[in-house]
Amino acid sequence: MAEYDSDEDVADLDYTTTTTLLGYAEPSPSDDAVSHLGGIPTWLDDPMDSRLAKCLSCNHLMPLLLQLDGNLPESPHHTRMLYLFGCRAKSCRKQRGSIRAIRGVKATGVAQAPSKESPAKVEQSPPEEPKAKPSSNMGDMIFGGSPSSGTPTNPFASASQTNPFAKPNPFAATDGVSTLAKTFAAVASISTPEAAKPASKPNPPASDADSPSSLIGPPSPWPPAEELPQYPNFYLDASFEELEPDALTLQSQKLAKTITMDTSDDLDDAAPSRSKKAGGASKPSKESEFESAMNATFLHFQRITSQNPEQVLRYERRSAPLLYSRDDTVGKLLASSKGGDKVSLERAPRCSNCGAGRCFEMQLMPHAISVLEGADAALDEGMVWGTILVGTCELDCAVAGSASGRFVEEWVGAQWETD
């Protein structure tokens, strides 16, 4: 938390409620017993091929880090579950495939079967008139009413739930954004403008280079629960993120520092006498500024998370992730090639099922390590990531033959702690 001169200064602050949903680990179940941290996975129907949960480095089955009920109002014809697995072996740290994300899909039978007509005939057929959505659905989704029977529901959290770790905010408005009535996925999707959602269009086929979920051969059965490696099970409570105003200005401060660093070369060239008098001190000064700019991303991460230190999960589909670093492989992939503060998954590998791009959906936070491993975990044997980013198919594609549940591997970006 930022320091202030007096209690009166703190009282005058207006906390800002963001559109990011934070998840908190709880030992007791909430209204939704499906979403949880640790424990063992449960399935939509048929269990997953166990090869999707094996570490690509050591080929051992990995324990579950997170299972999240991910139903979306924009995908009414299939239910959806997200799974995140991570290898515990010290030798597999920072190895590709040691953390894997899987999206489970199950068709509800509402959607019509794909047309077998030629593309030309499909184009000539008149478009269907859009069905008007019942006006009660949006209110039901936000305020906890009964959803329509044709749309899958996601009972992740109720409006009566509270966050025991969140800071009290006596000045927050008691509106629909300040409380969580349904799930991470449902509420975040409602808050997403329609214009931001990409239109469905043909996409080039995905490359298998970054799609380790391409499985060859017969499926490997899922083992019984007693044979599974597992962490303790914790349920998830959720609330919208609340930040102090000064934390929201940090991004602009970082940009100002970057601009200062970029202009330092011109200033040094224009004043050679100053560099000479300083005995070559300009070079260390520029290195210091460069290091400061590189650390700005981590400082921003630390500043934001410290205001809600017990968060184990951040969820906001189609938003930008909170980067742990811009200097590692993941940071360089997601940061804009044109500079500035823009972060997106435009250059991430495309969906292995339909070829569409991927959008950011959630990230696991470092406090989850403390929760899962407990206080007795050895310091040199535990998990060492700073954050785990998960990007999913931006079209939330259905999977053929998923009436009993099918699974697609999604993109994971693990940002590891530096040695």
Image: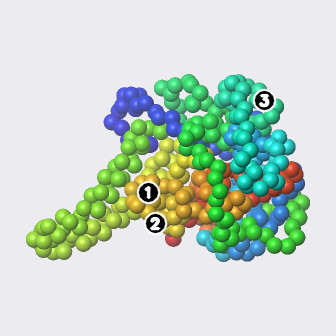
- CA–CA distance in space, label 3 to label 2: 47 Å
CB-based contact (under 8 Å), mark 1 and mark 2 = yes
Q: What number is the disc on residue 327?
A: 2
Q: Secondary structure at mark 2?
A: loop
Mark 1 crowd level (few <14, some 14–19, many ≥20, 10 Å Cα): many
Q: What residue is pinned by disc 1?
A: 297
Mark 2 crowd level (few <14, some 14–19, many ≥20, 10 Å Cα): some
**Which numbered disc, 1 or 3, marks the residue that appears first in the sequence?**
3
Q: What number is the disc on residue 148?
A: 3
**Which numbered disc, 3 or 2, marks the residue that appears first in the sequence?**
3
Q: Quadrant of the image for the N terminus?
A: top left
Tag nearer the camera, 1 or 3:
3
Q: From the viewer's side, name the closer residue of 53 and 161.
A: 53
Q: From the viewer's side, name the closer residue of 8 and 368.
A: 368
> Image height check: is 55 above or below 150?
below
- Inspect the image, locate mark 2, and give the three-letter code of the amino acid beneath it: Asp
- CA–CA distance in space, label 1 to label 2: 9 Å
